[in-house]
Amino acid sequence: MLSLKTRKDRCKQCKKERALRLCPRRNKGLCWKCCNALRVDLKCPESCPYAGKIDSDNAFPTFRSDNNSEYKQINQCYIDVWINKTISDWEGLSPAQLRKQDKDALLKKLSEYQYPGNFPIAYLMNRLDLETEKIAMPKSPDDIVAAYLDDIIALDFDKLITHTLNKLDFKDTQDRYAKIIRQNPYFKKLKRYSFIHSGLAEDGSQAIVFVELNLKEEYTFILRNDDNKWYIRQSIAGNPSLYFKQNDAYAAIAQHLSENKLEDAFYDISEAMRSYPDSADLYYYRALYWGLVDEKEKAKEDLLNSIALENTFSSPYMNLGLLYLIDKIYDEALFWFDELTKLEPDNLDAKNNLAIVHLASENKEKAMQIWRELNDKHPAYQPAKQNLELYG
């Protein structure tokens, strides 16, 4: 079947949403919303992969869906039809009629069915006016992206970080995150969004959600599963193919920096930021660039921005500590090296640098304590041994 994928392809039914599939029943390109409105009657030809499939063991047909929002909507649409549909095994009664006659009997009938994990059970119960315990459905990647975009539309940028894994709140990291996202040109006049496709990695640890913003701009979200909850990890200004290209872009930038090709590095960083506007890696690389051109304050700013975008990215912590150490701002250097040791307890260089800052700030006793502990636990780690010999 022909798949319509370009941004210019608009649904021939609603004229607004993006046409994603060619409907053999209408011989027109339709969006998934208009497709759902049509296929809910189960009259689509079997040749169509999006036609509902009937399984005799289940009350509800199986509908192929390209994203969770589509899956939820088509099943809710079918529930609206099904509750008034007569069922031969129920003595010719519809679910709505049985509800009026015998609520307990209806609940018993419903309990005999098998439902997929993300089937809208709560919606079914509500449509049949059945009082049951509140069903807590886990939020899907689509749900998280919807909440994120809804907050942007509402200009509630301070709430965005709650949809991410960034939980630290020091040095204005949360305010920095909101400021960076607020500056994203794709979000400045956001009024609406539509889901195009979503999918999970094979191990279920990551998800990609592909959307269209304001009926014209392609945008992609990368999410990570942590303790069975989904969080936004990154957004990409474009379609999902860009996700698989970013490592090559980062490698080229790193190569330019290592070869001191600073103009090439800055150009590539600036270009990459157009596609990866909230990439902690790119802010980190730009900080390295600022350091190489002796713009230390700009370097510090971008290192802070990198941490704000990804709290667990350790490299900016190390570089911030080193910059403050060089500037002899020891309280800040202590802070960042200490935070790095919390983030990476086995980072021996971070602990060694922490000791150096204590020594520089005239706290030799604390420095010697750290070096002795390092030497006792890691006798092969030479910097600790050498510093003990030098300053002991």
Image (spheres, rainbow, N blue to C red):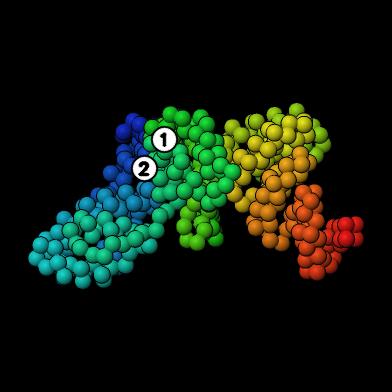
Count of numbered circles in the view: 2
Residue 205 is left or right of residue 53, and the answer is right
Q: How crowded is mark 2: few (under 14 residues within 10 Å), some or many (20 or more)?
A: many
Q: Earlier in the sequence, mark 1 or mark 2?
A: 2
Q: Quadrant of the N terminus?
A: top left
Q: Which amino acid does label 1 sit on?
A: Leu
> Which numbered marker is on residue 32?
2
The secondary element bearing badge 1 is classed as loop
Residue 208 point in image, percent of width and height: 51, 48
Q: Which residue lies furthest to the right in this view?
A: 390
Q: Which residue is drawn at 49% across and 51% down?
A: 231
Residue 151 is left or right of residue 320, and the answer is left
Residue 88 is left or right of residue 387, and the answer is left
Residue 77 point in image, percent of width and height: 26, 50
The residue that disc 1 covers is 155
Q: Residues within 10 Å of mark 1 (few under 14, many from 20)?
A: some
Q: Which residue is drawn at 63% across and 41% down?
A: 304
